[in-house]
């Protein structure tokens, strides 16, 4: 299998088929559980940063844990004032509100991932067609948190203790929308760090993560196979009115979102 050298992730494999991607994932797990959380980025030259980090770095020379907490508490306060803390008659916890804001496009420290490698592959291929993409998996043995657990603690109680951990935490949001279910949505988060791979605290050991390059040539092939074999495409990953509207916007031909 070909490899390419990158500034951020070192030498990464460049698979040419779905089978090769699955083989790489299995080989990385070795004798461990074959469970990763996956993130797809359309350009391998991008570090792994949260949207909040990218927002804050525009006007700050340094983004640290103190400035991130100040920003997110400001965001939660404004969202609460606007009435967004209530969902279907229930008051959301701080973390649930943060996840809701992230889901609707606000910049938070939460980093979108998927429990489904194929959904993450789609995101690695869906834009930047002339750039090599990144399929990034973090093995579950190197994550705090888990799946199917509520998070009812106050913001300070969650994030004040994060600095002791050198690995990411994860949380599965409740299925409050079709989009969350369709994408197998999961969040990664950590205290703010400044390392080569980005602002997410990840142990730089090969057993911790796997970085896979997705070449421009394979992006086109993968998108066709994801749609044809797995029915993974824009309309199925964004099965709501916003997704329908975008798929039928002026940016696409009339039948472009249909499989045949």
Image: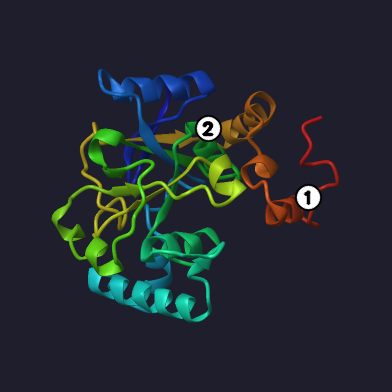
Instruction: Tell me the quarter of the image containing the N terminus.
Output: top left
Name the image quarter holding residue 151.
bottom left
Q: In the displayed orientation, state which residue is furthest to the right.
A: 254
Q: 232 left or right of 4?
A: right
Residue to which mark 2 is pinned = 118
Q: Which mark is residue 252?
A: 1
How many marks can you see? 2
What residue appears at the point 25 percent right and 18 percent down from the top-left corner?
A: 31
Q: Residue 18: percent from the left, percent from the top? A: 53, 23
Who's the residue at 70% across and 43% down the image? Answer: 235
144 lies above or below 193: above
Residue positioned 59% across, 33% down in the render: 217
The quadrant where residue 208 appears: top left
Q: Nearer the viewer, residue 71 or 54?
A: 71
Q: Position of residue 58 (x, y in %)?
A: 41, 74
Image position of 140 (left or right of 187):
left
User: Element under label 2?
Assistant: helix
Q: Position of residue 195 (x, y in %)?
A: 24, 55
Q: Percent from the top left, x then y, of residue 44?
A: 44, 45
């Amino acid at each position: 299998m070909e490899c390419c050298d990158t500034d951020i992730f070192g030498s990464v494999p460049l698979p040419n088929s779905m089978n090769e991607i699955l083989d790489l994932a299995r080989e990385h797990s070795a004798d461990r559980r074959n469970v990763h959380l996956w993130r797809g980025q359309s350009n391998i030259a991008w570090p792994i940063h949260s949207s909040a980090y990218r927002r804050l770095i525009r006007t700050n020379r340094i983004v640290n844990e103190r400035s991130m907490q100040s920003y997110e508490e400001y965001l939660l306060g404004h969202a609460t004032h606007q009435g967004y803390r209530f969902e279907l008659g229930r008051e959301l916890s701080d973390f649930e509100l943060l996840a809701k804001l992230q889901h609707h496009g606000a910049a938070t420290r939460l980093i979108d991932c998927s429990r489904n490698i194929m959904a993450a592959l789609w995101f690695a291929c869906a834009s930047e067609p002339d750039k090599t993409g990144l399929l990034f998996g973090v093995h579950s043995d190197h994550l705090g948190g888990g799946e199917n657990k509520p998070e009812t603690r106050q913001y300070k109680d969650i994030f004040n203790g994060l600095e002791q951990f050198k690995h990411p935490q994860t949380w599965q949001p409740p299925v409050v929308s079709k989009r969350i279910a369709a994408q197998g949505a999961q969040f990664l988060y950590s205290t703010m760090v400044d390392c080569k791979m980005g602002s997410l605290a990840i142990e730089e050991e090969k057993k911790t993560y796997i970085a896979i390059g997705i070449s421009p040539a394979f992006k086109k092939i993968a998108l066709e196979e994801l749609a044809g074999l797995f029915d993974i495409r824009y309309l199925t990953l964004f099965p709501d009115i916003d997704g329908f509207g975008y798929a039928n916007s002026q940016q696409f031909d009339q039948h472009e979102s249909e499989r045949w």
